[in-house]
Image: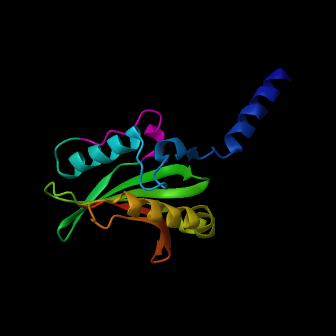
């Protein structure tokens, strides 16, 4: 009888879906005027090196299972880097990928976006629309150089996203 209990417990455990990994500690501050954690900044910097064929993507410790294989495509003058998220959330909204745009040569152009699953559109809007508007006001005040930095929640082609464009 004891063996059946163990077997049933194991089978029930297999039937339960694994909880999505919260990306909140990694993305902390990103929706507050584009403040980056050290770990997220390092991930982005390593993605630049990867895209320019100068290094590899360094996934922060503890997030190795959250990310899939990165991809780079050239789009006109830009490199489009995609860091797919296997099963992660930010503020309980399912994340599809992190998207980065840079130029091939270092130029100060960089745009970073958390792309949410389309199925999470309403949830993303509720979680990020007001935060994005407040963050844009804060970011504008911080932009002493007048570069026109942009941040906030947007829906492009039906896809919800939270963006930080800090191009100089």
Residue located at (82% from left, 28% from top): 5
Q: Nearer the viewer, residue 136 or 41?
A: 136
Q: Is residue 77 left or right of residue 154?
A: left
How many marks the image carries: the answer is: 0
Percent x, y for residue 68? Answer: 41, 48
Q: Nearer the viewer, residue 120 or 167?
A: 167
Residue located at (41% from left, 54% from top): 34
Percent x, y for residue 150? Answer: 37, 66
Q: Secondary structure of the magenta portion, mostly?
A: loop
Q: Nearer the viewer, residue 64 or 30?
A: 30
Q: Is residue 113 visible?
A: no
Q: Dividing the picture into quarters, in which one does residue 98 lie?
A: bottom left
- Residues shaded magenta: 56-67
Residue located at (50% from left, 76% from top): 158
Residue located at (47% from left, 40% from top): 65
In the image, residue 123 above or below residue 4: below
Percent x, y for residue 29? Answer: 48, 48
Q: Nearer the viewer, residue 86 or 95?
A: 95
């Amino acid at each position: 009888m004891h063996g059946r209990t163990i077997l049933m417990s194991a089978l029930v455990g297999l039937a339960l879906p694994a909880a999505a990994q919260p990306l909140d500690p990694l993305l902390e501050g990103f929706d507050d005027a584009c403040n980056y954690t050290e770990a997220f900044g390092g991930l982005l910097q390593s993605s630049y090196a990867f895209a320019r064929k100068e290094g590899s993507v360094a996934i922060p410790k503890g997030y190795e299972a959250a990310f899939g294989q990165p991809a780079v495509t050239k789009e006109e003058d830009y490199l489009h880097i995609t860091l797919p998220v296997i099963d992660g959330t930010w503020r309980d909204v399912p994340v599809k990928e992190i998207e980065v745009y840079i130029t091939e040569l270092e130029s100060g152009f960089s745009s970073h976006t958390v792309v949410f699953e389309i199925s999470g559109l309403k949830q993303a809007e509720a979680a990020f629309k007001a935060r994005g508007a407040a963050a844009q006001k804060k970011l504008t005040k911080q932009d002493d150089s007048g570069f026109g930095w942009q941040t906030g929640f947007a829906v492009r082609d039906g896809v919800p996203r939270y963006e930080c464009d800090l191009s100089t």
